[in-house]
Amino acid sequence: MAYTYEYPHLAVTTDVAVFTLQKGELHVLLIRRGNDPFRGAWALPGGFVRPEEGLEDCARRELEEETGVSGFYLEQLYTFGAVQRDPRERVLTVAYFALIPSDRVVLKASADADAVAWFPANRLPELAFDHRDILKAARERLAAKLDYSTIAFQFMPAVFTLSELQTVYETIKGEKLDKRNFRKSILALKRLETTGKYKREGAHRPAMLYRIKARKGVEIIK
Amino acid sequence: MAYTYEYPHLAVTTDVAVFTLQKGELHVLLIRRGNDPFRGAWALPGGFVRPEEGLEDCARRELEEETGVSGFYLEQLYTFGAVQRDPRERVLTVAYFALIPSDRVVLKASADADAVAWFPANRLPELAFDHRDILKAARERLAAKLDYSTIAFQFMPAVFTLSELQTVYETIKGEKLDKRNFRKSILALKRLETTGKYKREGAHRPAMLYRIKARKGVEIIK
DNA sequence: GCAAAAGTGTTCCAGATACACCCATGT
DNA sequence: ACATGGGTGTATCTGGAACACTTTTGC
C-alpha cells in the first residue's frame, strides 16, 4: 500500500508526556520500543496521526491502546519539528502532556511495545529521539501551571487529604510549603469540600477526606 | 512530480498571526488569497513546510517572502489539526505569532498574493479556514504575556517615549492605566535607559526618549 | 495666557509570608 | 506515655492600587 501526493507531505505523530505521582515522587510513563529506530530504548507513548483523526483524538487513542488508561487530563504542549529529530525521515510530532491520578496507574502491555513502565522523573533512562527535550518542556509547563491553575487536582483520586494534596505541590515544585498557608490558600479557592469521612492510617490523628466540588476541567485562578 | 510514501502523511503548513500597532490600534497582517480554496478571501500569511526546513524557518521565510519584513519576534502558538479545517484535504497548521515594531510596517506585494494589508484587529474581514480561531488564540496569548514578560518591547522602535509604551499596553489590554504606576513598574524592571534626547511634537512639554538596554529576546518577569 | 501632554510621591489596602502549639490516634 | 502526622490563628511584610498637581512647550 502506498500513499501518493502532488507535493511533499510530512509524517506526523503525537507523543504524550504522561505524569503521575507515586510514593511522593513524580513519575513518567515510558514505553520500550519494539522497532527501529531506537529499538530497545525507552520513549514516550505516541504514534502516527491517521488521516481522518483529530490530533487530540490521536494522542488519547495511542495512550489508551498502549496503557489501558482513559479519562485522563490531556493538553497540547508544543510541536517539535527539527528536521533531523528522526533518523529515518522528517517526522513532526505534536507533543501533549497528560496527568493521571495516582490510583489509576495500572498498566497493560500491548502489541506496540515490549514493555510499559513508570520511571521517576528525576532518574530517566536513555530516551529515543528528542523525547528528553519534550519531557523537559512538559515538566516546566506543569510546574508553571501549579501556580495559576487548578491543574494539581488532576493528580488526585476521588477523595484525598489536604496533606496529600500538599505533597503533590511540594513534589512538583521541589520545595517545602508551609502547612497553614497552603491550607488557607487552597480552601480559599472554594473548589474543595469535606466528605465528612476520615482517613485513618498509622498512629496519629485521622485526616479529613476532601473531594473536588466540580471535577470539570482545569481552571485558571488568581 | 509526485511524492509517494509507505503510510499516510499529512500536508503541513505554518501560519503566522502578525501584529503591529498603528495609530493606537492593534493591527493584523492579512493576505488576500489568489488561489482556491477561499480565493479572494483574506487569510494569515503562511504556506507549506518544505521537507528540509525547520518549522520556525518556514514561518519566517513565508512571512519575509510575502511582506519583505525580517528580524521580527516569532513564537510558536498552537497546532491546529481539525480534520475538516481545509476543504481540500487534511492540512495541519503549526500556528505562530509575530510582532513587528510600528516603524517597520512597510509591505511589498508578492507573487503569492493579490494583496497584503494591515487590518485593525477589532474590525476584521471574513477570513479563510479557521484563521479567526488562530487570531483569537494569538490575541489571548499576547494579552496574557504583557503581564509577565517584556513582550511589549517588541512593538517599539529604536527609541520611544514612556507614554508611547503605555499606549501599547493600554491598546492590547483594552483598558486605561495609571500613568504614575505604569512608569514606576516599567522603570523598576531596569530594562530601559534614557537616551538624553527628547521627542518634541505639538504644543506641549517634550518627552524623554528611552531605548531598550539589551534588545535580546522576551524575558519572563516577576 | 492657555491648551496639551510630560513628569513626579505618598497613602492605603490586600494578599502573601512567617511562625508554634494543641489534637487524636495506635502501639 | 510517647511518637506521629493532623489541624488551627495572628502579626508582619510587601507589592499593587488609588490619587492631583506642577512643568514645559507651541501657538
Image (cartoon, coloured by chain):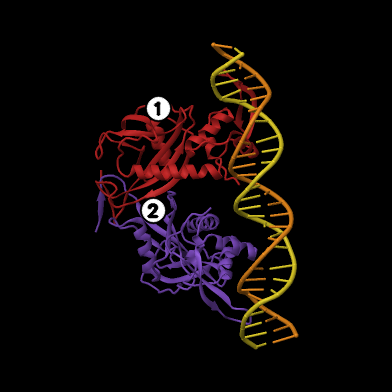
Chain colours: A purple, B red, C yellow, D orange
Circle 1 sits on which residue? B107
In this image, B63 relative to A123: left or right?
left
In this image, B131 relative to C8: left or right?
left
Q: Position of residue B218 (x, y in %)?
A: 55, 41
In this image, B32 relative to A77: left or right?
left
Q: Secondary structure at mark 2?
A: strand
Circle 2 sits on which residue? A91
- Figure check: A118 above or below A85: below
Q: Nearer the viewer, residue B214 or A45?
A: B214
Cα gap from disc 2 to disc 1, whole angstroms: 34 Å
Mark 2 vs mark 1, foreground winner is: 1
Q: Nearer the viewer, residue B162 or A15?
A: B162
Asked if badge 2 and badge 1 are on a common chain, one would say no
Q: Chain of mark 1?
A: B
Kindly identify the amino acid type of the residue bearing the numbered disc 2. Answer: Val
Q: Position of residue A99 (x, y in %)?
A: 46, 64
- Please give the label number shown on residue A40: none
Query: How many numbered tags mark residues here?
Result: 2
Residue neighbourhood size for the residue with mark 1, other residues' Cα within 10 Å, grouped as few (<14), some (14–19), many (≥20)? some
